Amino acid sequence: MMKPRMNDEIQAVLAGESQGCVLCGDCLDMMKEIPDGAVDIALTDPPFSRDTHTGARSKGDDDHPSGHIAIDFESCDVSVIRQAFAAAKAKRWVVSFIDWQYALPLKTHPPDGLKFIRLGAWIKLNPMPQLTGDRPGQGWEAIAILHPPGVKRWNGGGSSATWVHGTSRYGWFGPSSHPTEKPLSLVSDMVEKFSDAGELILDPFCGSGTTLVAAKMLGRRYIGIDISQEYVDVANARLQAVDTSVPHKEAKNGQMSLFRNQKS
């Protein structure tokens, strides 16, 4: 029987025939196709809790004075995140933006095969304000940093697990193609600090593909998985834009590559 296309794409990455791939499906099912020991680093951004998703709103208008729903995809329970981190079978780091409410459960009951090493933080330079004005806004996101038992190594030296950076909202640090898209420069710094050139990075909740774009630009191999075909398509367009030097939104409008010799 012919192998499914998904498996062919993964095998091409593992065989060195392709730098990376983006797959559509449930990550818990699809990660079963990845052999043990293949993934070096998992760097990801899973959905947050139901409370966080429900409370996330954009600025209101005359028709919607309380604001619009800002996150249009399903929330994720900590038990699913725990399973996903374990299923990644990373040889080195598992690094993930997480809902702060999930930090303690991951610390007290870490995923199989992993130890909770550090809780990092992304301090936002331009956070979403608290639209109700009756309480402080949330100006940071938690970052869970885990590692299998044994010797640890990263490229950040003695620096702290704190990233001070603006968001992709309002056009800062590039246009956003996803409600919770992280800035490319922020994720690129994390890729550089937690991985080495040539290593394989897995993002099981890849969304619009920022981790994959950073991996490609920095000479890492990558496998991305997302349950939404819409965002898989966006991720593939952004990855193609790395080769053409044309941002994917402009490419959709027919703009040509800045360099005649590059592949489209």
Image (cartoon, rainbow, N blue to C red):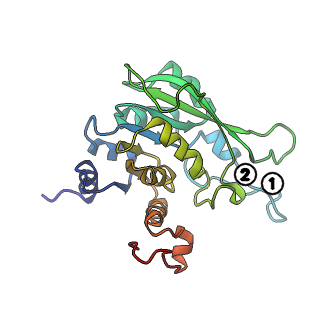
Distance of label 2 from label 1 (alpha carbons): 8 Å
Q: Say which amino acid is labelled 2.
A: Arg
Crowding near pointer 1: few (<14 within 10 Å), some, many (20+)?
A: some
Q: Is residue 69 visible?
A: no
Residue 93: which quarter of the image?
top left
Answer left or right for 128 relative to 31: right
Callout 1 secondary element = loop
**Residue of label 1:** 66
Secondary element under disc 2, as helix, strand or loop, is: loop
Q: Are marks 2 and 1 in contact (CB under 8 Å)?
A: yes
Relative image position of residue 100 (x, y in whole percent): 63, 32
Q: Quadrant of the N terminus?
A: bottom left
Percent across and percent down for residue 240 are: 43, 66
**Along the polypeptide, which appears first: circle 2 or circle 1?**
2
Task: Identify whether 160 is placed above or below 241.
Answer: above
Q: Which mark is residue 57?
A: 2
